[in-house]
Image (spheres, grey):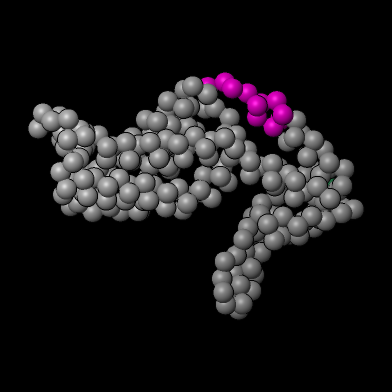
Amino acid sequence: MDNAFLSQANFKNIEKVNLFLDQLTSTFEAQGLKSLDYCPYCGLKETDGTRNVKGAVLHVHEACVDAFINKVSTHLETEGKSKEHLIQSIVLAMVGGVIGLIPSIILLVFTGIYSAWLFMLIPLAAFYGFKKGGAQKGSYVMILIAIISLILAPGFMFYVYYSDAMYYNVLFSDYLAVDGIRAAFIKDMTFSVLFTLISLGVSWKQIYKQTLGQIKKDIEALKK
Ligand SMILES: [Zn+2]
């Protein structure tokens, strides 16, 4: 929207909400902004419809909403489907994921502790890398981020054990045949997969709302 600014108050106490809204209104008035009784798309009054956008009632012109939906839909159909910069974005997503893995490695090596919070850095950093690459953020980004994250953390864990076996100059299968080592290997692999899944679950919404999938959903909600 070009002419409107939506703000959400997040107080539980209703008096605080009113106080906040009063302050907000007077701040906006002081800035020359009015409350939203005009169409946010064209900035004109005498509206002929309303839309509920994320809890806020907007007064709109049906024609303006239609034009906006058309504009965004066309954009999604054309530029949104572009594969430009895709390779670059995928490579940077992997680089980002590796960088996101580093804090978890450091903590693990020095303390032997897994932190779900640190694991969250992996998908978030991978997504940051993808964005830096400049490709369109279609819904498939979610799958890409999940794959990268699920390869990196368990992959690193596997590498640790594999390089240990190399170090002792034994076959990997023989190395895992040792009872204590096999138990530790299974535990570490399970934890790294589990924590990656948790971190993906927690960061999913954060990432999804920046994809074109979210824009499509928002556009669907505007249709009547
Ligand atoms: Zn309008």
**Which residue ends up furthest to the left in the rendered image?**
168
Viewer-closest of 110 and 178: 178
At a point 54% along the width and 27% down the height, the residue shown is 135
Q: Is residue 40 left or right of residue 47?
A: left
Q: In this view, does 99 lie above or below 110?
A: above
Residue 44 to residue 91: above or below: below
Judge whether residue 97 is colored magenta.
no
Q: Nearer the viewer, residue 128 or 63?
A: 128
In the rendered image, is residue 107 in sight? no
Q: In which quarter of the image is the N terminus?
A: top right
Q: Is residue 128 above or below residue 51?
A: above
Left/right placement of residue 75 relative to residue 137 reads right
Is residue 195 visible in the rendered structure shown here? yes
Residue 207 position within the rendered picture, expressed as x and y whole percent measured from the top left: 52, 44
Give the residue at x 32% y 49%: 190
**Image quadrant where residue 96 sits:** top left
Residue closest to the eye, 204 or 128: 204
Q: Which residue is depicted at the point 27% across and 37% down? A: 158
Residue 101 location, x and y as percent?
Answer: 31, 40
Q: Where is residue 17 in the image (x, y as percent from the top left)?
A: 61, 72
Q: Which residue is at 27% across, 40% downward?
A: 157
**Start and end of the magenta stretch?**
75-85
Tell me if residue 83 is in the magenta stretch: yes
**Residue placed most toward the observer, 180 or 220:** 180
Where residue 129 appears, as percent x and y from the top left, is: 43, 33
Q: Is residue 25 left or right of residue 88?
A: right
Left or right? Give the position of 33 relative to 127.
right
From the viewer's perspective, is residue 168 above or below residue 181? above
The number of numbered discs placed on residues in the rendered structure image is 0
